[in-house]
Amino acid sequence: MKTIQGIGLAAGLAALTMTATTASADQLRFAIGHPPASFLVKAGETMAKTMAAETGDAVTIKVFPMSLLSMAETSGGLRDGLADIGTVMSTYFPAEFPHTNLLLEASMMLSTLPEDPTGVEAQAYSAAMAEYILTKCPECNAEFAKQNQVYTAAAGTPGYALNCTKPVVTMDDLKGARLRIGGANWAGWSEAVGAAPVTMSGNEMLEALSQGVLDCIILSVPDVQNFGMGQSVKHITMGAPGGVYVASMAQVNRDTWQDLSSEVRTALLKAAALGSAEASLAYENNQADILEKVKAKGVQVHQADPAVVEATRSFVDGYLKAMPAAYQQRYGVTRGEEMLSDFRETLIKWVGLARTAKTREDLARLYWDEIYSKVDVNTHGM
């Protein structure tokens, strides 16, 4: 049986086949709202290969990119059993996942850490979220249970940039600019710098950008290519607004999870460890290459004007301080200040740990040792 090096199943194939509650031909449906060439889909396919290897094909995964469910449909479809596994963008559902979104919308705190996280933002923030949710946030897991979901893994992006049809570099450029945002933090930043935030599904961005409905998309540079928007983007501004996005990469339908044996749940977590490591590392490592390629095609890459950087720093400080009270008022989150303080320490730890992992396998092993091996599959999600 092929396994991820260092994290193989203890149970043998015969025992696994006997104890799995699903038949040998069972196949789990994995809905990912990204296009087939995206890093998330490729990581999902890696999960599928790992799951098949770990279970000896007793339980397999079939990935459905942009077909079974869109990003906006995935949470509800997963809840209702239209998919067994799904990549959930929790910020699409602020009322359903407030505790999870509190952690995610604080991602601009990366710019306030004692150690510069450049180069490991994706790996570190996604790992910190996964560890915190799985070990320190019962409220997060209760939110997932209410939606008939079980949390397993996270995948993150590098810092968000301005991907535009025209130069948007200075404070004057930002005034009135229509910016597609993917979370409340970026909406707040847009308003703070005089721009107009626009909310829409990720699946709608390309058409809106090409038709001039948007001036810019606040997004990671790799995702501009993942969504096929490269031809519409003519200018990229780095250094603002920052922050990252972390998807709940492999949410599992709770009924499906509970129908699996403990051995198969463990196999799924091992597949998720490798898949999340692959996605986050691919996002981070490919950014520099993508920037060079788009520059060769005539895209102009700018650095945000110092006044924009200063305005961003001022916004982040105020936003982080205001978040706990705002989340308590809007969503009844009572531990916001405690959560953000504890999470910051977890994030600082992961910035250091992530720098020690140079390969996908290194990072997967680190994720397994530090996070997923500590999950009790007999109680988690049950």
Image: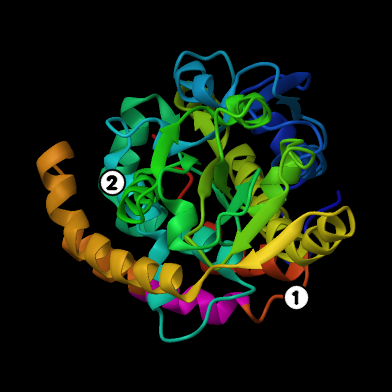
Q: Is residue 368 above or below residue 91?
A: below
How far from the left and from the top, in percent, is residue 367? 59, 64
Q: Is residue 353 magenta?
A: yes
Q: Which residue is drawn at 31% across and 35% down?
A: 143
Q: Which residue lies furthest to the right in this view?
A: 296
Total marks drawn? 2
Mark 1 lies on a secondary structure that is loop
Q: Position of residue 351 (x, y in %)?
A: 52, 76
Q: Residue at x 43, y 30 (%)?
A: 149
Question: Is residue 70 positioned above or below 91 on the image?
Answer: above
Q: Nearer the viewer, residue 97 or 375?
A: 97
Q: Residue at x 25, y 45 (%)?
A: 139
Judged left or right of residue 25, residue 83 is left
Q: Examine the rendering and report whether any part of residue 39 can be seen.
A: no
User: Is 359 or 21 nearer to us in this picture?
Assistant: 359
Q: Name the side, left or right, on which 194 lies relative to 49.
A: left
Look at the magenta stretch and give its main secondary structure.
helix
In the image: residue 293, left or right of residue 343: right
- Kindly identify which residue carries mark 1: 358
Q: Where is residue 92 in the image (x, y as percent from the top left)?
A: 42, 32
- Whether 44 is among the magenta residues is no
Q: Name the residue carrying label 2.
A: 99
> With respect to residue 145, does 140 lie above or below?
below
The one nearer the camera, 77 or 35, is: 35
Q: Which of marks 2 and 1 is nearer the N terminus?
A: 2
Q: Which of 66 and 308 is in front in this view?
A: 308
Within-10-Å neighbours for mark 2: few <14, some 14–19, many 20+: many
Q: In which quarter of the image is the C terminus?
A: top left
The amino acid type of the residue labelled 2 equals His
In the image, which residues are magenta? 345-354
